[in-house]
Amino acid sequence: MKEMKFYGTALPGIEIEPYAGKLIVIEGTDGVGRSTHVALLRTWLESAGHAVLDTGMTRSVLAGRGIKNARTGHTLGRLTLQLYYATDFADRLENQILPALRAGFVVLTDRYIYSAIARGHVRGADPEWIRKIYGIALVPDAVFYLRMPSAEGLARRVLASGRGFDYWESGMDLGLANDYYDSFIAYQKLLLKEFDRMSGEYGFHVLDASRPLKRIASALRRSIAPLIEDASQLTEIVKPASVSSITRIPPASPPTEPQVAEAELREKSA
Amino acid sequence: MISYGYHRYPGRLFVVEGTDGSGKSTQLTLLYQWLKSEGYSVFFSEWNSSLLVKDTTRRAKKRRLFTPTTFSLLHATDFADRTERDIIPPLKAGAIVLADRYIYTAFARDVARGCDRAWVRDLYKFAVKPTAAFYFRAPLDVATERIASARPQLKFYEAGMDMGWSDDEEESFKIFQGKILDEYDSMRSEFGLTLIDATQPIHTQQRQMREIVGRYLRENLKEKAVPAK
């Protein structure tokens, strides 16, 4: 069990009590493969018998749809966007993350407050202001930052995925350049700088995202395994009560080679 | 750094605040008519009016998705959109902006709902400081009486039913409004709100309001009267 610790002012009306689960954050800029790793980790954890909740930015019941609609129109002001993200975050924190942690789940989150803070900084928001707003955030058990050494590398990843450049991912609202590619490079450079700055402040575990997917996946598992093992109260699959001798679930084992290869293939062909 | 509070725009921003049923919207409408007839460019900005946020708010109210924190944050999002779209541009252009409810509404309501006082104030750091903020103060029984007679049914969040203070809507509304009133009273000196006694006749209140607003406008005209060299 771990004490709840918040970055700043805790949520109102919250009972600060020890929780059994683990909050694990996967952070990184656009195109570093965060969602692929979240999916791999989820399979790995579940096959080892741990209950997993995965969540990510703009996936709240309350504000997710509103943000998507507002982004489509490209008419969102900078402050408005910041606060919309904060609303989305608070809703997920209160209604998904905290209940799951209390119930002993491993919560995997694709981005946390750091992406929102980085985007805010790059858009000229007062750093003090944005940190105070996100003071309601629970301090995670671990933050893994998938770091790409260059913005050009990110651009290659985005192209390889076949998605092409998106208005917001390219930071077109900032007016940094005239076309999506130049703007993407300029914007992602700024974000990379912000993430590097936050690495020390928030104690990120930095992983080189330019390495092969398989290597990153096993590095993640190596770092996460000890976190999970010491959490004996984590929700595990329990045999029906009629079975008298409770068989222990075998300790977490890395996913098999085909699983990783498959994921790699999926990412390439996606 | 985006922090509008300290900027000086040529325009003027007047806001009205007070509990539900204090008559502040009536007063603001009268002020608007007067300023229009005097030939000023006047813009109106209402609480909870951002088109970008509207659907989310409506859905969340209907489905009761709010917690005190998300209620506070979504209203701040709405307010940010108003600030960026409806408030700053006219102020920069030298117009008059009239706001029906401003940040003090959030401070009063959110704190009454249990949000941290300092956190809510930090949240709204980006807001423009008003030229003058009028606080229409009506005693609790007067305000609740006005609301009860004007509305057949109180809404869930309006009545503070999300807080579980009471199962009875009217009772819950009174408790909520009482807390809000206390917050307003303590903000009078904190933010220098201009107190208007909302139990006075409507025209008396309007005369007081026009007198004060007029002072800020004359000052503005004087500035303009200085010939540029």
Image (spheres, coloured by chain):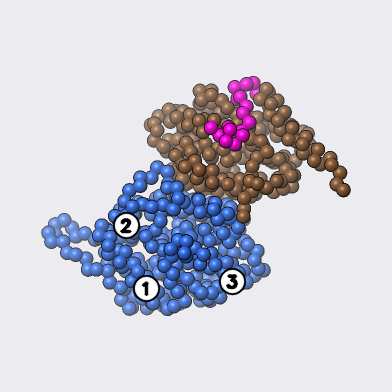
Chain colours: A blue, B brown
Give the class, few, some or many, for how many residues have Cα within 10 Å of label 1's Cα (few <14, many ≥20). few
- Quarter location, residue B217: top right
Task: Kindly identify which residue carries mark 1.
Answer: A219
Pointer 2 and pointer 3 on the same chain: yes
Q: Residue at x 40, y 49 (%)?
A: A94
Residue A196 appears in the rendering:
yes
- Quarter location, residue B220: top right
B150 relative position to B89: left or right = left
Which mark is drawn over residue A185? 3
Is there CB contact under 8 Å for labels 1 and 3? no
Q: Residue at x 55, y 73 (%)?
A: A151
Residue A43 appears in the rendering:
no
Magenta run includes residue B187: yes
Which of the two discs, 2 and 3, labels the residue nearer the N terminus? 2
Give the class, few, some or many, for how many residues have Cα within 10 Å of label 3's Cα (few <14, many ≥20). many
Magenta run includes residue B166: no
Which range is magenta?
Answer: B186-202
Give the class, few, some or many, for how many residues have Cα within 10 Å of label 2's Cα (few <14, many ≥20). many
Measure the alpha-carbon separation of dots 1 and 2: 21 Å
What amino acid is found at the position of numbered circle 2 in the picture?
Gly
Which of the two discs, 1 and 3, labels the residue nearer the N terminus? 3
Task: Kindly identify which residue carries mark 2.
Answer: A21
Measure the alpha-carbon separation of dots 2 and 3: 38 Å
Q: Residue at x 74, y 47 (%)?
A: B93
Query: Pointer 3 indicates a residue of which chain?
Result: A
Query: Pointer 2 indicates a residue of which chain?
Result: A
